[in-house]
Image: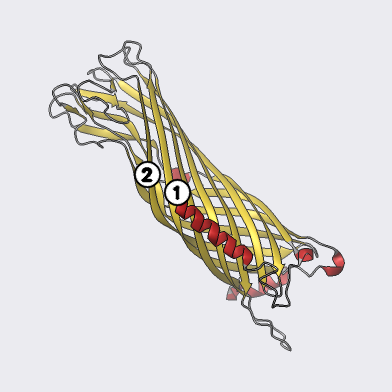
Amino acid sequence: MTVCRYLFAGAALAALTAFSPAAQAQESGSMQVGNTTVSVGGGTAILTLPDVPSLIARHSSAAPFSQLEDFKFSDDFGDEIGWNVNGSIAVPFGANKTLSLGGFWANIDDKDSATCITTAAGQNCRLFPLFDPDPAVLNSSSTANIVGRTYASDAERDVDQWGVSLESRWNLTPEVMGVTRAPKRRTFTLGADIRGIDQDLDVSFLSNNPVVGPATYTEDLDTRYYGAYAAWGGDYTLPFLSGVTSGLGLRSSFLLRGGVYYADTDYSGRIVDDNSVTQSGFTASSALSLSRTDTAFIGGLVLETSKRIGARAMLSLKSEYEYYSYVPEMAYNQVDVTVGTTVLGAGGQVGTRIGSDGAFSAKTSLRLTIKLGPREIMEPLK
């Protein structure tokens, strides 16, 4: 972990020093403070994280005590639309180089519910612990073996997605003189960034069994991504819309971006069960901490259409689509071993672990870009 942070810091330092005044000693270009641009924006956000399974399961109360049905705390999270805010500051270095610092913050949340019902004699609905601390006793809270007993859960999932980046961009478009139509811009970018996906889950449980009290489950599942990326892009025009966009003064650009990241995930979960009539040997609380590290690829496409609204200002619509090759996916314990090594919920998930899956992110925002500096040294926005 420490080594990866040093590598990230080295990549960021390299991006910064690549355009420092010392590095520019042999070039005519220098930092053009008068042409610094600041951008701010806000809009919608979507993140297709994996579903969250439940700690509740319906299983047979007679041998072989097999699991009959499991449930989910959170389902179809990708259907939820949240919000995002973003900003950046860019400083030109010479004629074709730019150094920029940027960041974003997005929030998406949803609420879901699930109810386990015993539909026939010989069934139980059970809230399992995060792990089985003592196989010699019953560690899970259960409804009675009666038709119509329920174990209901209401879950709220709140996710923060954020990132901070430092990047250097080169303008690859050659200077062409004496032509009526300039070539389309092309750029190449190298950058280093830190990303985060922080998930909070709060669940409340309630049973219609008079001997089973309410329970709660809380979870923090945080992932940090440390890495570097490269990007290539430029202007584009759709042939059948070129006349319309030029007439309206619109300019469209794209950016293909991809990078490799070190992903570090930390999990912390806790169940607190308040049985009004304590079951024999029942553990009233169950807490667990886990961690996992992995390598992730994050890449995608950025599309932006902009229009100048003055000498110093530009308004644009920006859409970012990204793929995360790694995001954590929790799998909770759904078995309980009792006296005599009887396994309740046989066939369910054994123990709690951090798995993995992929995810897609989409952010759309309206951005305002303003150029700073005295009018006499300010160049027009491009």
Q: Which residue is mark 1?
A: 48
Taking the image as shown, residue 236 lies to the left or right of residue 213, namely: right
First of labels 1, 2 by sequence position: 1
Q: Is residue 264 above or below residue 339?
A: below
Taking the image as shown, residue 150 lies to the left or right of residue 250, namely: left
Q: Which residue is mark 2?
A: 329
Task: Name the spot of residue 80 as percent of width and height, x first.
Answer: 49, 43
Task: Residue 99: tell me if it is visible.
Answer: yes
Task: Residue 118: tell me if it is visible.
Answer: no
Name the quadrant of the C terminus: bottom right
User: Observer-nearest residue: 371 or 319?
Assistant: 371
User: Observer-nearest residue: 257 or 91?
Assistant: 91
User: Observer-nearest residue: 362 or 329?
Assistant: 329
Residue at the image position 43 percent from the left and 48 percent from the top: 264
Element type at mark 2: strand
The image's colour scheme reads secondary structure
Taking the view exactly as shown, the residue that stands out farthest to the top is: 277
Identify the amino acid type marked 1: Thr
Task: Name the spot of residue 37 as percent of width and height, x first.
Answer: 73, 61
Q: Residues within 10 Å of mark 1 (few under 14, many from 20)?
A: some
Identify the amino acid type marked 2: Glu
Foreground: disc 1 or disc 2: 2
Residue at the image position 63 percent from the left and 65 percent from the top: 17
Task: Name the spot of residue 288 as percent of width and height, x first.
Answer: 36, 32
Quarter of the image for residue 64 reads top left
Between marks 1 and 2, how big is the CA–CA gap? Answer: 12 Å
Element type at mark 1: loop
Circle on res. 136:
none
